[in-house]
Image: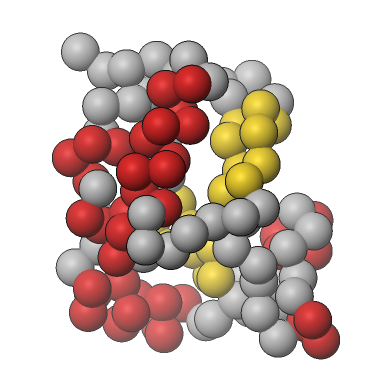
Amino acid sequence: MVALRDSADLLKNFDAEIFMISLDDPQKNKEFSEALGSAHVLLSDPEKKIAEAYGVIGFGGLYARRWTYYIDREGVVRDIDKNVDTQTAGQDIAARLESLDFYKRN
């Protein structure tokens, strides 16, 4: 989340909405997001329904894997990054958005 926060200016150049989903409850996610000063949406999935649907439930169901899904306007999954580097995630997302020809905002 820090890498995304720190890359916010770069990411806003793309016609893309970026959000994360956590297995934590909404209050915990709100506190976490506020503590980091992040402008990105952090959704809660404590019942693990979304995580299960996207196949990201980790060992024992205790965590969600850090995968990035690139979904276009038509709802088509264009790519999945299963090797997210938390240190460079923002820059990596921007590079992938560009390579997938996601439209840049003017």
Residue 84, horizontal then vertical, whole percent: 54, 56
Closer to the camera in the image, 69 or 75 = 69
- The residue at 37%/62% (across/down) is 87
| Percent of width and height locating residue 69 | 61, 43
Quadrant containing the C terminus is top left
Q: Residue at x 66, y 71 (%)?
A: 64
- Residue 93, quarter of picture: top left
| Front in this rendered view, residue 45 or 90 | 90
Image quarter of the N terminus? bottom left
In the visual, does 32 lie left or right of 67? left
Front-most of 103 and 85? 85
User: Could you tell me which residue is drawn at 57 percent across and 49 percent down?
Assistant: 68
Q: Considering only vertical position in the picture, is 67 above or below 48?
A: above
Residue 74 lies in quadrant = top right
Q: Position of residue 90 (x, y in %)?
A: 35, 48
Question: Can see residue 92?
Answer: yes
94 shown above or below 67:
above
Viewer-proximal residue among 106 and 45: 106
Position of residue 77 measured from the top left corner of the image (x, y, whole percent) = 69, 31
Q: How is the image coloured?
A: secondary structure
Residue 15 falls in image quadrant: top left
Which residue is pictured at 30% across the width and 72% down the height?
33
Residue 84 vertical position relative to residue 15 in the rendered view, above or below: below
Tally of numbered discs? 0
Q: Along the horizontal axis of the image, is 41 left or right of 10? A: right
Q: Is residue 17 left or right of residue 65?
A: left
Residue 16 in view (yes/no)? no
